[in-house]
Amino acid sequence: MTNKELYIIGNGFDIHHGIQSGYANFKDYLRKNDSIIYNLVDDYLPVDESWSDLEECLAQIDMESIMDYASRVIVSYSAEDWSDAYHHNYQNEINEIVEGLSSTLLKYFTYWIKQLEIPSRDKVFEKLINLSKNGIYLTFNYTNTLQRIYDIPKKNILFIHGEAESDDNLILGHGWNPISIPEVGDMVDTESIDTRVIEGYTILNDYFGKTFKDSQKIISEKIDFFDSLKDVLVIYVMGHSISDVDSEYFKAIINAVDISKTRWQVSYYGESGLKERQSAMIDLGINESLVEYYELGKMQIFRIQ
């Protein structure tokens, strides 16, 4: 494997090849297959119209609205028709929403990814990019696009968040570390508040751990891959937004390469996309003179000897 070229592959790469892998496609899939979970996303996560920011929004769950909704089942301890079941109705309501937006949502996401149709090379011939079969590939996608369309050896590819063909536990999540969440006692007066509400807070706090993408842990588990990048001289970022949710991976790459001489080519889509990529690269501390920006289909791939 030639350790001088690194290709970072994002979802825009699959979309470029005609694969229906956008979050808008997942939105349509979920709406058709489970309207309840679809409505939970729509009601309690601040997603945009196309759900393109779904991962980031997992960290912005509307706790107040969830608690307001669940409060309709709280029955006063002094109620004449009191039942022991009333001890848990409120917590159960919150737990159903939390499970829906964590494990159940991920289950459907995995189902959806696995049924995506990957075209053959001849069907996307006009969209092909001059990739090297000897380069190193870090893909944030779950599909086998690189192998099926480009014949890239699987040994050259790291599926950082899992591979649809072989993994049932794909990784989807936000980047807000739940260890920063304050204790329940720091948020509410536990001595004067209903114990059922306190337990509801705890369930909601647990949600952030269930939906957290622990990038640091993943990096440590794949440290051999990142260590192998020390000789990389050019990095191609193809179809990746360089969003905050994946920033830890980019930082790990930057720490591994010689940042003073490694050249970058970064793809973008549209004028706003260009500005976002430029801002992201500046935030990562990359010398602007070492970065070139291209629309994905026009990237200037060159071989390094």
Image (spheres, rainbow, N blue to C red):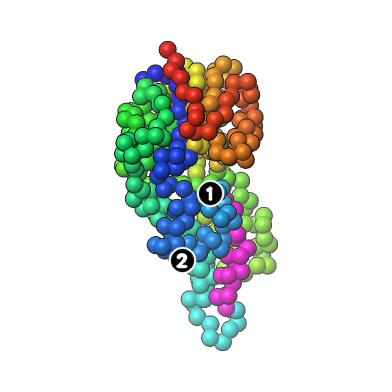
Q: Which residue is mark 1?
A: 52
Q: Position of residue 114 (x, y in %)?
A: 34, 48
Taking 256 as reference, is 42 above or below it? below
> Residue 43 location in percent, x, y?
56, 63
Residue at 39% in and 62% down = 33
Q: Tell me if residue 304 is in the magenta stretch.
A: no
Give the percent coordinates (x, y) of residue 288: 64, 24
Mark 1 or 2, nearer chain start: 2
What amino acid does circle 2 point to? Ile
Disc 1/disc 2 C-alpha distance (Å): 20 Å
Q: Is residue 164 left or right of residue 199?
A: left
Q: Residue 235 placed where, x, y %?
A: 50, 24
- Disc 1 marks which amino acid? Ser
Horizontally, is 196 left or right of 122 in the view? right
Q: Nearer the viewer, residue 300 or 137?
A: 300
Label 1 element class: loop
Q: Are marks 1 and 2 in contact (CB under 8 Å)?
A: no
- Mark 2: give few (<14), some (14-19) or many (20+) Cα within 10 Å: few
Quadrant holding the N terminus: top left
Quadrant of the frame with the C terminus: top left
Question: Which residue is at a point 48% across and 62% down the rendered structure image?
Answer: 38
Element on which disc 2 rests: helix
Q: Which residue is labeled 2 in the image?
A: 36
Is residue 18 in sight in this rendering? yes
Q: Which residues are magenta?
A: 59-75
Pick the front one: 285 or 88: 285
Question: Is residue 158 among what the camera can see?
Answer: no
Q: Nearer the viewer, residue 295 or 174?
A: 295
